Amino acid sequence: MIRLLSVVALVCGLLLAPAAQVQARAQDLFPGANLDTAIPAPEGVIGHPVGARLTPVADIHRYLETLAEAAPDRMVTGEYGRTWQGRRLIWAAISSPENIARLDQIRAASRALADPRTTDAAEARRLIADTPAIVWLAYSVHGNEVGPAEASMAVARHLLAARGDPRIQRMLQDTVVVLIPTQNPDGRDRFINGYRAGQGLESDPDVQSVQGREPWPSGRFNHYLFDLNRDWFAQTQPETRGHAALQMQWKPQVVADIHEMGTDQTYFFPPEADPFNPLFTDSQLAMREVIGRAHGQVFDAAGIDYFTREYFDAFYPGFGDNWPGYSGAIAMTYEQGSARGDVRRRSDGSLLTLFETVRSQFLISLSTIDAAAVNRRQLMSDFHAYHASAIEDGRRLGAILLPRTGADPTAADRLARLLAGQGVEVGVAGAGFSACGSHAAGTYVIDLAQPAGRLARVLLDPSISLPADFTAEQERRRAQGLDHQLYDVAAWALPLAYNTPAIQCRSRPGVAVTPLSGDAPLSGGVIDGQTAAAWIVQPGLSGMRFLTAALREGLTVRVLEAGFTLDGRDWPAGSLVLTRGANPDDAPARIARIAAQAGATVQGVGDTWVTSGPSLGSGRAPVARAPRIAMAWEAPTGATSAGGLRWMIEQAYGYPVTIIRTAQMATSNLGEYDVIILPDGGGYASTLGERGVANLRDWARQGGVLIGVGGGMGFMSEPGSQMLATRLEGRVADEDASEPAPADEATVPGVILTSPDQLRGAIRPAEGSPDSIPGILLRATTDPDHWLAAGVAHTLNILASGSDIYAPLRLDQGANVVRFAGPNDLLAAGYIWDENRAQLAYKPAVVAQSLGSGQLIGFAHDPSARGFMRGLDVLFLNAVFRGPSHTR
């Protein structure tokens, strides 16, 4: 049974003060505490008390490092990476002098407990008895959630300075506390700079003020506008990669991801809302509730309102509070109602101050440490047992195989390295073998009997689904016109996202494997290249990376729009060809260097005589241009879509993009650009105005490639835009629905309802959009005869969400390049409403249409969503890099 008296007494003895005193004296955050003056107060380092005003990232770091200098026997700091903008990412560890002196030993012990294959029962018992729990407190992953990062300074100071308090000393004896003060430095400083720009005589609590209205893109996101709290398994951003790597070094037992939410909210902590991911263990869920109850007692003593269970589910593994759970941690999200600055007025007229939010975050941080200290032995024992049960489950389940087959073998290479980089043991088969079929050497083998077996399963298994009772409740809510309760996406299986095969095999392969490292270079190079008449590169992720680099180098590359046969070998549509005659004398050396960097295999051929399919110099082998790319930026684009698309082109494929404020496109000389991208967003027509819409349309008519994604496609399909011929569909009428009552009639004809289904039809709105679906993976098929699909697999998986469904283009209008599968094959992973399944079947997901001399291309759903739908990269990049070859 958990003991709660420690922190409750701490709260009552040190932190409770009359509300008026707390409001009036932000400088006295901890009334009654006996703080050691040898530990520097924040005022002398950052110029103000914690909670008095916002603190820039550099000052937070400076204060924590000053504390470490003042108490080096109890606190150490380090750097775990840099942001895109070059800001440091730092951590701090605080514990007793004895623990700090043996910090390497403690980390090693935690890693040993996480691998029962090498730690026998006796050694585990010894480590459990002797090892403090590692408590990981991560603050402010969203840059505009400002209070948590402020609280990190208060927590560090109090742990070091609380003099004569045996409770604090016991916490530090039984735990090592790791603080991540600012997970998103770029976003935080963006927010603070904007907030300070609106500063007047005093901070303005009015939500209508400049200080109360963040400009686009807000401080929530990092430099490339990724939501870092959804990047934990995609690992696309340096902030996430560094943080995840640091956690893997430490293997914490408790992780708290500390956030803020809407100003009118109180405080949320676990247990979470349904649904829970089925791969969480009973002991993990039980301990989350134990810790939550401890928090409840602390908040009751402090007079702070809170809630649990009603919001924030634990299903999607990409969150900072879920991904660590598959490494055995008790991982939790905390959410505080936010002042979004120094002070904010709630809708009831009361004021919420930064100081109040810091106080709550400070309290729950201490409560988390105390709960871990009180339950240390149970935590350590459960942590070891978690990994032992993962291995035992894996012995029963066998292995997952990633063969280098399918349309793009390099997709398997990249997926295998992504998994290995986050602690999943991946082996490379040294020879061919038979297990659930025959497989070649080089196949990736993931034996599930490993400590990270559950992480591998949750990322790779498409059958992980929402509980039946949860989906039944959502259907009931839909029938009543209520929104579904799923907090985030319901599907993410990475083999589907990468569009590469994965085989779940109960038979464990007996082949010898070589362990794969997450940073292992992709193999690429040139075969028979020095005396070649031409060089050929297969399409795919590595092939596209080769193309973008070759275009930047000024090499001449042709892209074949159909398969062909040369020298007895068949090559697929989308293959890249560089002929010696069209390229400079040093082309062989440059091609070899690009191939190695891109991880692409380049085949040299002795002649260019094609025996089947288009010749290498034909019109069906157009030269790819090096396009000048522009992208709409700022309102009304969706920040994550704009950032994700830019990140894909610039960082994943190394090609620059010019970003232009959307409103500026009304008067800009768009003739400077070959390709313009409109990311997902709403309100393009009003932002551009008639002049801007006409400017875009005329530019496309004159030979531009205009690509609309999500809401960008929706804008292009609006009748007023006079661009795409497709239109959004409304909801399909319900045959059981009665006719709507005329507005000017006093009575309507009577009807007899004979079933609940008829009642649902009668009360459903007669018009409107289809019901919105959560993020799910849907199957789609490509048109193999269209240039946009060259080098793309025949079957794709698309992360779809929302309610947009488009009517197909007629043959005289354009091409439905990618269409959704039929109703029985549509769902690849997740859960879909029956009405959406029926209405989405066979509808277009990607369309292409000529407009004058230019091309219009629409993507109904964002192919860059969250950076993990890599199986769609080639399709989108075909539009960007091959589209200009199809304009006049």
Image (tube, rainbow, N blue to C red):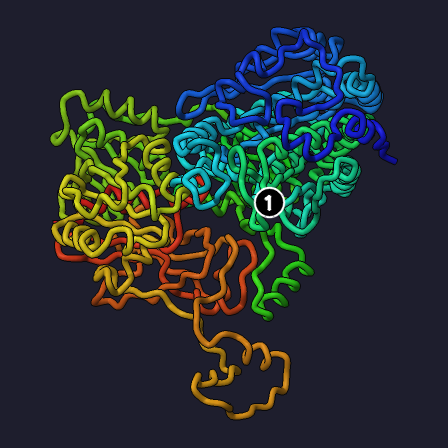
- Foreground residue, 264 or 74? 264
Left or right: where does residue 641 sit relative to residue 14? left
Q: Position of residue 234 (x, y in %)?
A: 50, 37
**Mark 1 nearby-residue class (10 Å; few <14, some 14–19, many ≥20):** few
- Foreground residue, 714 or 143? 143
- Give the residue at mark 1: 350
What is the secondary structure assignment of the residue under circle 1?
Answer: loop
The answer to whether any part of residue 255 appears in the image is no
Tell me: residue 482, above or below residue 280.
below
Q: Position of residue 198 (x, y in %)?
A: 40, 34
Q: Residue furthest right?
A: 1
Q: Amino acid at mark 1?
A: Ser
Quarter of the image for the N terminus: give it: top right
- Please tell me which residue is depicted at 73% across the width and 18% down the height of the picture: 109
The answer to whether any part of residue 366 appears in the image is yes
Dividing the picture into quadrants, the one containing residue 475 is: bottom right
- Please tell me which residue is depicted at 17% across the width and 37% down the height of the picture: 608
- Foreground residue, 880 or 262? 262
Q: Position of residue 545 (x, y in %)?
A: 32, 33
- Please tell me which residue is depicted at 23% across the width and 20% down the height of the picture: 589
Q: Position of residue 623 (x, y in %)?
A: 16, 40
Q: Residue furthest bottom?
A: 749
- Please tell me which residue is depicted at 48% across the width and 18% down the height of the picture: 58
